[in-house]
Image (tube, rainbow, N blue to C red):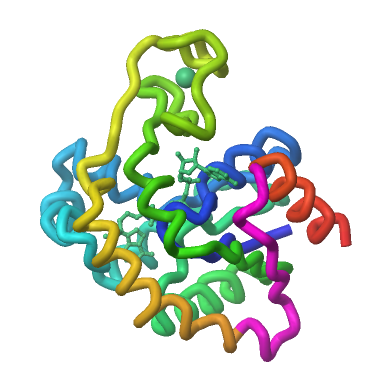
């Protein structure tokens, strides 16, 4: 099964993707994570993407679609993909169709995380992740059960994203509204969109998504 998690920054895409990976053995394909890895490694893609990401704008369609194609090719036969943060433009949606079709794959569901924009700034400015395993946390909504220790891997180091500040978040939300939200009708026309209440607590959101996947 291949699904897209669609929603503005802070909607809970990464959080829910990590849970689906654990429960169903699917693979999370986050273009944001791929780009941050490229920035950290100082690759040509990373060098190009850094300033764009720091500004909260969108990296070029060609770059992100190439990253997705490469990751799909590295996956074992039969493993399901969770597209997290991709596609974000109509051009990327068209590329994804081609990328999947040329590999004999198809999209099963587009899960739209429906959230109240006013809550997103608080979600994003309180977000942090484990530096060793990447598990996501929040200052208020999901603290490690033992202070300073990662629940998943026992790590003690955590990090915050440089673009998770209020000003950049506003730009990222505007980008979402202008370029990403308009791709929903493409998938609605195919009858594969399921709208999930992203304002519910994390477990309830997970339960709603599992219901969609189990059809
Ligand atoms: P996205 O990947 O869509 O940008 P994340 O999954 O990283 O969003 O979530 C943003 C922040 O909000 C994280 O710190 C996460 O712990 C928190 N969060 C995610 N889902 C919920 C929820 N349903 N209720 C409260 N906080 C949440
Ligand atoms: P969030 O889910 O919190 O919005 P991401 O980690 O998905 O953040 O993305 C962080 C940044 O990486 C974006 O603001 C953008 O600059 C870049 N990016 C990630 N995915 C894409 C994409 N599919 N197309 C263009 N830019 C992207
Ligand atoms: Zn960890």
At which x and y percent is residue 90?
43, 84
Residue in front for this viewpoint, 178 or 183: 178
Residue in front for this viewpoint, 3 or 138: 138
Which residue is located at x 70 percent, y 38 percent?
Answer: 25
* Residue at the front extreme of this rendering: 118
Which residue is located at x 50 percent, y 82 percent?
Answer: 183
At which x and y percent is residue 61?
31, 73
Which quadrant of the structure image shows residue 185? bottom right
Q: Is residue 195 above or below residue 144?
A: below
Q: Is residue 191 above or below residue 120?
A: below
Q: Is residue 30 left or right of residue 107?
A: left
- Image quarter hosting the N terminus: bottom right
Question: Magenta segment, which residues?
Answer: 187-201
Q: How many marks?
A: 0
- Image quarter hosting the C terminus: bottom right
At which x and y percent is residue 143?
50, 23
Q: Is residue 189 left or right of residue 170?
A: right
Which residue is located at x 71 percent, y 46 percent?
Answer: 206
Q: Is residue 100 left or right of residue 154?
A: right
At which x and y percent is residue 192?
73, 77
Residue in front for this viewpoint, 89 or 199: 199
Residue 191 painted magenta: yes
Q: Is residue 41 above or below residue 5?
A: above
Which quadrant of the structure image shows residue 211? bottom right
* Residue at the right extreme of this rendering: 215
Residue in front for this viewpoint, 128 or 22: 128
Residue 28 painted magenta: no
Which residue is located at x 29 percent, y 33 percent?
Answer: 160
């Amino acid at each position: 099964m291949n699904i897209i998690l669609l929603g503005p920054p802070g909607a809970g895409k990464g959080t829910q993707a990590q849970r689906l990976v654990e429960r169903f053995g699917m693979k999370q394909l986050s273009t944001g994570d791929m780009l941050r890895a490229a920035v950290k490694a100082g690759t040509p893609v990373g060098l190009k993407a850094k300033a764009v990401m720091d500004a909260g704008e969108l990296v070029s369609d060609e770059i992100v679609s190439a990253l997705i194609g490469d990751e799909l090719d590295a996956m074992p036969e039969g493993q399901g993909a969770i597209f997290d943060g991709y596609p974000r433009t109509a051009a990327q949606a068209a590329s994804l169709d081609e990328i999947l079709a040329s590999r004999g794959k198809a999209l099963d569901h587009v899960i739209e995380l429906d959230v109240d924009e006013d809550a997103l700034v608080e979600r994003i400015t309180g977000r942090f992740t484990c530096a060793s395993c990447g598990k996501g946390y929040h200052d208020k909504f999901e603290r490690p059960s033992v202070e300073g220790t990662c629940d998943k891997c026992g790590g003690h180091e955590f990090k915050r994203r440089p673009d998770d500040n209020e000003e950049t978040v506003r730009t990222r939300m505007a980008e979402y509204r202008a370029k990403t939200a308009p791709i929903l009708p493409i998938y609605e026309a195919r009858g594969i969109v399921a709208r999930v209440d992203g304002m519910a607590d994390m477990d309830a959101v997970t339960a709603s998504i599992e219901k969609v996947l189990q059809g």
